[in-house]
Image (cartoon, grey):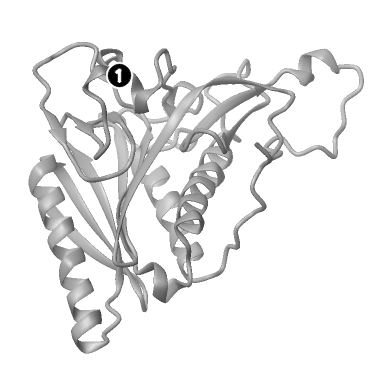
Amino acid sequence: MQNTTQQLNDTLISKSLTTADYVPTLDAMLARTLARIDLKKQQGLRTPDELWIVDHNDVYTLGQAGKEEHILQRTNTPIIKTDRGGQVTWHGHGQLVIYWLFDLNSLGWSVRNLVSHAEQAIEDVINDCLQNPASSDITAISAHARRDAPGVYLYADTSVADDSDNTDTDAPANSTSVDDKMMLGKMASLGFKIKHGFSYHGIALNLNCDLSAFNAINPCGYAGMQMLRLSDFVAMQKESDEQTGEALSYEQVTQKLIDNIAKRHAGLIELRALAPK
Protein backbone atom coordinates (compact mmCIF):
# COMPACT_ATOMS: atom_id res chain seq x y z
CA MET A 1 0.00 0.00 0.00
CA GLN A 2 1.63 3.22 -1.18
CA ASN A 3 0.49 6.67 -0.11
CA THR A 4 1.17 10.26 -1.08
CA THR A 5 0.04 13.41 0.71
CA GLN A 6 -0.94 16.76 -0.81
CA GLN A 7 -1.79 20.09 0.87
CA LEU A 8 -5.09 21.33 -0.57
CA ASN A 9 -5.46 24.43 1.61
CA ASP A 10 -4.49 25.62 5.10
CA THR A 11 -6.93 23.26 6.81
CA LEU A 12 -7.27 20.38 4.34
CA ILE A 13 -4.87 17.75 3.04
CA SER A 14 -5.35 14.72 0.81
CA LYS A 15 -3.74 11.31 1.11
CA SER A 16 -3.78 8.75 -1.70
CA LEU A 17 -3.68 5.01 -0.94
CA THR A 18 -3.31 2.44 -3.74
CA THR A 19 -4.13 -1.28 -3.68
CA ALA A 20 -5.24 -0.84 -0.08
CA ASP A 21 -6.61 -3.69 2.04
CA TYR A 22 -9.71 -2.64 3.93
CA VAL A 23 -8.92 -3.58 7.55
CA PRO A 24 -5.54 -1.79 7.88
CA THR A 25 -7.04 1.25 6.13
CA LEU A 26 -9.97 1.31 8.56
CA ASP A 27 -7.64 0.86 11.53
CA ALA A 28 -5.45 3.75 10.37
CA MET A 29 -8.46 5.98 9.70
CA LEU A 30 -9.94 5.31 13.14
CA ALA A 31 -6.56 5.81 14.85
CA ARG A 32 -6.10 9.17 13.09
CA THR A 33 -9.60 10.28 14.06
CA LEU A 34 -9.11 9.31 17.72
CA ALA A 35 -5.77 11.15 17.80
CA ARG A 36 -7.42 14.29 16.40
CA ILE A 37 -10.22 14.06 18.95
CA ASP A 38 -7.67 13.76 21.75
CA LEU A 39 -5.62 16.72 20.51
CA LYS A 40 -8.71 18.90 20.38
CA LYS A 41 -9.98 17.84 23.80
CA GLN A 42 -6.64 17.94 25.62
CA GLN A 43 -4.90 20.86 23.91
CA GLY A 44 -7.65 22.68 22.01
CA LEU A 45 -5.81 22.11 18.74
CA ARG A 46 -7.57 22.13 15.39
CA THR A 47 -5.74 19.70 13.14
CA PRO A 48 -6.05 19.80 9.33
CA ASP A 49 -8.97 17.83 7.93
CA GLU A 50 -8.09 15.00 5.57
CA LEU A 51 -9.43 13.43 2.38
CA TRP A 52 -8.23 9.86 1.91
CA ILE A 53 -8.34 8.86 -1.77
CA VAL A 54 -8.38 5.07 -1.74
CA ASP A 55 -8.06 2.36 -4.38
CA HIS A 56 -9.26 -0.67 -2.43
CA ASN A 57 -8.54 -4.30 -3.08
CA ASP A 58 -11.82 -6.19 -3.56
CA VAL A 59 -13.94 -6.32 -0.40
CA TYR A 60 -17.56 -6.36 0.75
CA THR A 61 -18.23 -4.19 3.80
CA LEU A 62 -21.25 -4.52 6.06
CA GLY A 63 -22.33 -1.44 8.02
CA GLN A 64 -22.78 -1.29 11.78
CA ALA A 65 -26.48 -2.17 11.56
CA GLY A 66 -26.03 -4.22 8.40
CA LYS A 67 -28.07 -7.37 7.88
CA GLU A 68 -26.43 -10.56 6.64
CA GLU A 69 -29.56 -11.32 4.62
CA HIS A 70 -28.45 -8.70 2.08
CA ILE A 71 -25.46 -10.90 1.19
CA LEU A 72 -27.00 -13.12 -1.47
CA GLN A 73 -23.98 -15.21 -2.43
CA ARG A 74 -20.69 -16.03 -0.73
CA THR A 75 -17.65 -15.57 -2.97
CA ASN A 76 -13.89 -15.51 -2.48
CA THR A 77 -14.09 -11.77 -1.77
CA PRO A 78 -13.77 -11.05 1.98
CA ILE A 79 -16.77 -9.69 3.91
CA ILE A 80 -15.77 -7.20 6.62
CA LYS A 81 -18.02 -5.87 9.38
CA THR A 82 -17.32 -2.17 9.78
CA ASP A 83 -18.51 0.76 11.89
CA ARG A 84 -20.01 3.06 9.24
CA GLY A 85 -23.69 3.59 8.66
CA GLY A 86 -25.58 1.74 5.94
CA GLN A 87 -25.88 -1.84 4.80
CA VAL A 88 -23.62 -3.89 2.52
CA THR A 89 -21.58 -2.59 -0.40
CA TRP A 90 -18.56 -3.51 -2.50
CA HIS A 91 -15.24 -1.71 -2.93
CA GLY A 92 -12.59 -2.55 -5.49
CA HIS A 93 -10.41 -1.41 -8.35
CA GLY A 94 -12.03 1.00 -10.78
CA GLN A 95 -14.14 2.51 -8.00
CA LEU A 96 -13.18 5.86 -6.47
CA VAL A 97 -13.41 5.82 -2.67
CA ILE A 98 -12.90 9.05 -0.72
CA TYR A 99 -12.95 9.09 3.07
CA TRP A 100 -13.82 12.42 4.72
CA LEU A 101 -11.92 12.90 7.99
CA PHE A 102 -13.52 16.22 8.94
CA ASP A 103 -13.93 18.19 12.16
CA LEU A 104 -17.58 19.08 11.63
CA ASN A 105 -17.83 21.45 14.61
CA SER A 106 -14.90 23.55 13.41
CA LEU A 107 -16.48 23.70 9.95
CA GLY A 108 -19.87 24.60 11.39
CA TRP A 109 -21.42 21.65 9.56
CA SER A 110 -24.21 19.43 10.80
CA VAL A 111 -24.31 15.76 9.83
CA ARG A 112 -27.01 16.66 7.29
CA ASN A 113 -24.67 19.30 5.83
CA LEU A 114 -21.92 16.69 5.50
CA VAL A 115 -24.18 14.25 3.66
CA SER A 116 -25.56 16.98 1.38
CA HIS A 117 -22.11 18.33 0.53
CA ALA A 118 -20.98 14.80 -0.32
CA GLU A 119 -23.98 14.10 -2.54
CA GLN A 120 -23.87 17.49 -4.26
CA ALA A 121 -20.12 17.25 -4.93
CA ILE A 122 -20.73 13.92 -6.68
CA GLU A 123 -23.69 15.38 -8.59
CA ASP A 124 -21.55 18.31 -9.77
CA VAL A 125 -18.76 16.08 -11.05
CA ILE A 126 -20.96 13.48 -12.74
CA ASN A 127 -23.07 16.15 -14.44
CA ASP A 128 -19.92 17.94 -15.60
CA CYS A 129 -18.55 14.67 -17.02
CA LEU A 130 -21.85 13.95 -18.77
CA GLN A 131 -21.14 16.91 -21.04
CA ASN A 132 -18.80 14.46 -22.81
CA PRO A 133 -21.09 11.43 -23.35
CA ALA A 134 -19.79 8.07 -24.55
CA SER A 135 -22.40 8.00 -27.32
CA SER A 136 -24.64 10.47 -29.08
CA ASP A 137 -27.51 8.22 -28.00
CA ILE A 138 -26.83 9.10 -24.35
CA THR A 139 -28.60 12.42 -23.93
CA ALA A 140 -30.67 14.16 -21.29
CA ILE A 141 -29.19 12.07 -18.47
CA SER A 142 -28.35 13.72 -15.16
CA ALA A 143 -27.23 12.82 -11.65
CA HIS A 144 -29.33 13.50 -8.55
CA ALA A 145 -29.45 12.57 -4.89
CA ARG A 146 -32.63 11.25 -3.28
CA ARG A 147 -34.08 12.25 0.07
CA ASP A 148 -35.32 8.71 0.78
CA ALA A 149 -32.11 6.79 -0.01
CA PRO A 150 -28.57 8.22 0.42
CA GLY A 151 -26.35 8.19 -2.63
CA VAL A 152 -26.36 9.60 -6.15
CA TYR A 153 -28.46 8.16 -8.97
CA LEU A 154 -28.71 8.68 -12.72
CA TYR A 155 -31.98 9.78 -14.26
CA ALA A 156 -33.15 10.04 -17.87
CA ASP A 157 -35.35 13.00 -18.73
CA THR A 158 -38.39 11.32 -20.29
CA SER A 159 -39.94 14.68 -21.14
CA VAL A 160 -37.31 15.21 -23.87
CA ALA A 161 -38.87 12.52 -26.06
CA ASP A 162 -42.41 13.60 -25.21
CA ASP A 163 -41.79 17.31 -25.81
CA SER A 164 -39.35 17.17 -28.72
CA ASP A 165 -41.42 19.76 -30.59
CA ASN A 166 -41.74 22.05 -27.57
CA THR A 167 -38.25 22.28 -26.08
CA ASP A 168 -37.74 24.61 -23.14
CA THR A 169 -34.18 25.81 -23.71
CA ASP A 170 -34.12 27.55 -20.33
CA ALA A 171 -34.61 24.32 -18.33
CA PRO A 172 -31.25 23.01 -17.06
CA ALA A 173 -30.44 19.36 -17.75
CA ASN A 174 -29.54 18.79 -14.12
CA SER A 175 -32.60 20.40 -12.56
CA THR A 176 -33.09 19.27 -8.97
CA SER A 177 -36.61 18.03 -9.71
CA VAL A 178 -36.82 14.38 -10.72
CA ASP A 179 -40.59 14.27 -11.09
CA ASP A 180 -40.38 13.97 -14.88
CA LYS A 181 -37.32 11.72 -14.93
CA MET A 182 -36.86 7.95 -14.97
CA MET A 183 -34.30 6.52 -12.55
CA LEU A 184 -31.72 4.36 -14.31
CA GLY A 185 -29.77 3.21 -11.27
CA LYS A 186 -27.22 4.13 -8.63
CA MET A 187 -23.70 5.34 -9.39
CA ALA A 188 -22.40 6.45 -5.99
CA SER A 189 -22.90 5.33 -2.40
CA LEU A 190 -22.05 6.96 0.89
CA GLY A 191 -21.80 6.01 4.53
CA PHE A 192 -20.26 8.00 7.38
CA LYS A 193 -19.40 7.52 11.02
CA ILE A 194 -19.41 10.48 13.42
CA LYS A 195 -17.41 10.35 16.64
CA HIS A 196 -17.31 13.37 18.99
CA GLY A 197 -18.07 15.68 16.06
CA PHE A 198 -15.45 14.15 13.75
CA SER A 199 -16.44 12.28 10.58
CA TYR A 200 -14.74 9.38 8.89
CA HIS A 201 -15.64 6.85 6.17
CA GLY A 202 -17.18 8.56 3.13
CA ILE A 203 -18.19 8.01 -0.50
CA ALA A 204 -17.72 5.46 -3.30
CA LEU A 205 -18.18 6.40 -6.97
CA ASN A 206 -18.19 3.71 -9.67
CA LEU A 207 -15.92 4.84 -12.50
CA ASN A 208 -14.80 1.89 -14.61
CA CYS A 209 -15.08 -1.04 -12.19
CA ASP A 210 -16.53 -4.49 -12.88
CA LEU A 211 -20.14 -4.14 -11.73
CA SER A 212 -20.68 -7.91 -11.53
CA ALA A 213 -19.39 -7.81 -7.92
CA PHE A 214 -22.68 -6.18 -6.92
CA ASN A 215 -24.66 -9.22 -8.14
CA ALA A 216 -23.79 -11.08 -4.94
CA ILE A 217 -25.47 -8.50 -2.66
CA ASN A 218 -28.46 -6.23 -2.29
CA PRO A 219 -26.48 -3.00 -2.76
CA CYS A 220 -26.94 -0.77 0.29
CA GLY A 221 -29.81 -3.06 1.33
CA TYR A 222 -31.98 -2.45 -1.74
CA ALA A 223 -33.01 -5.63 -3.53
CA GLY A 224 -32.78 -5.29 -7.30
CA MET A 225 -30.96 -1.94 -7.20
CA GLN A 226 -29.26 -1.42 -10.57
CA MET A 227 -25.68 -0.26 -10.06
CA LEU A 228 -24.11 1.93 -12.73
CA ARG A 229 -20.61 3.12 -13.65
CA LEU A 230 -19.52 6.36 -15.24
CA SER A 231 -17.59 4.69 -18.08
CA ASP A 232 -20.86 3.40 -19.59
CA PHE A 233 -22.10 6.97 -20.00
CA VAL A 234 -18.93 9.02 -20.47
CA ALA A 235 -15.94 8.47 -22.75
CA MET A 236 -13.25 7.21 -20.35
CA GLN A 237 -9.79 5.87 -21.00
CA LYS A 238 -8.89 2.31 -20.24
CA GLU A 239 -5.97 1.91 -17.86
CA SER A 240 -3.65 0.82 -20.67
CA ASP A 241 -4.61 3.69 -23.00
CA GLU A 242 -2.41 6.69 -23.64
CA GLN A 243 -3.82 10.14 -22.86
CA THR A 244 -6.25 11.31 -25.53
CA GLY A 245 -7.97 14.64 -25.96
CA GLU A 246 -11.54 13.44 -25.57
CA ALA A 247 -11.64 10.54 -23.12
CA LEU A 248 -11.49 11.28 -19.41
CA SER A 249 -9.03 9.39 -17.24
CA TYR A 250 -9.68 7.94 -13.78
CA GLU A 251 -7.22 10.52 -12.43
CA GLN A 252 -9.02 13.45 -14.07
CA VAL A 253 -12.37 12.49 -12.56
CA THR A 254 -10.69 11.99 -9.19
CA GLN A 255 -9.13 15.46 -9.35
CA LYS A 256 -12.47 17.04 -10.32
CA LEU A 257 -14.06 15.55 -7.21
CA ILE A 258 -11.16 16.51 -4.92
CA ASP A 259 -11.30 20.10 -6.22
CA ASN A 260 -15.05 20.34 -5.67
CA ILE A 261 -14.83 18.97 -2.12
CA ALA A 262 -11.93 21.31 -1.30
CA LYS A 263 -13.97 24.32 -2.44
CA ARG A 264 -16.89 23.21 -0.29
CA HIS A 265 -14.56 22.74 2.67
CA ALA A 266 -13.25 26.31 2.15
CA GLY A 267 -16.79 27.71 1.95
CA LEU A 268 -16.51 28.56 -1.75
CA ILE A 269 -19.43 26.33 -2.81
CA GLU A 270 -22.64 26.65 -0.83
CA LEU A 271 -25.22 23.93 -0.41
CA ARG A 272 -28.12 23.93 -2.83
CA ALA A 273 -31.63 23.61 -1.48
CA LEU A 274 -32.57 19.97 -0.99
CA ALA A 275 -34.96 18.46 -3.48
CA PRO A 276 -38.44 17.75 -2.08
CA LYS A 277 -39.20 14.23 -0.92
Residue 214: image x %, image y %? Answer: 30, 19
Residue 65: image x %, image y %? Answer: 27, 36
Name the residue rendered at 27%, 87% in the picture: 44
* Outermost right residue: 166
Residue 97: image x %, image y %? Answer: 30, 43
Quarter holding residue 16:
bottom left
Name the residue rendered at 39%, 15% in the picture: 223
Does dot 1 land on a helix, a strand or a loop?
helix
Name the residue rendered at 36%, 28% in the picture: 220
Amino acid at circle 1: Phe
Total residue callouts: 1
- Tell me: residue 229, above or below residue 55: above
Name the residue rendered at 47%, 62% in the picture: 110
* Outermost bottom residue: 43
Residue 165 visible in the current orientation: yes
- Tell me: residue 159, above or below residue 259: above
**Relative to 161, 79 lies left or right:** left
Give the residue at mark 1.
214
- Tell me: residue 254, above or below residue 211: below
Packing grade of label 1 (10 A; few <14, some 14-19, many >=20) is: many
Residue 120: image x %, image y %? Answer: 54, 48
**Relative to 207, 135 lies left or right:** right
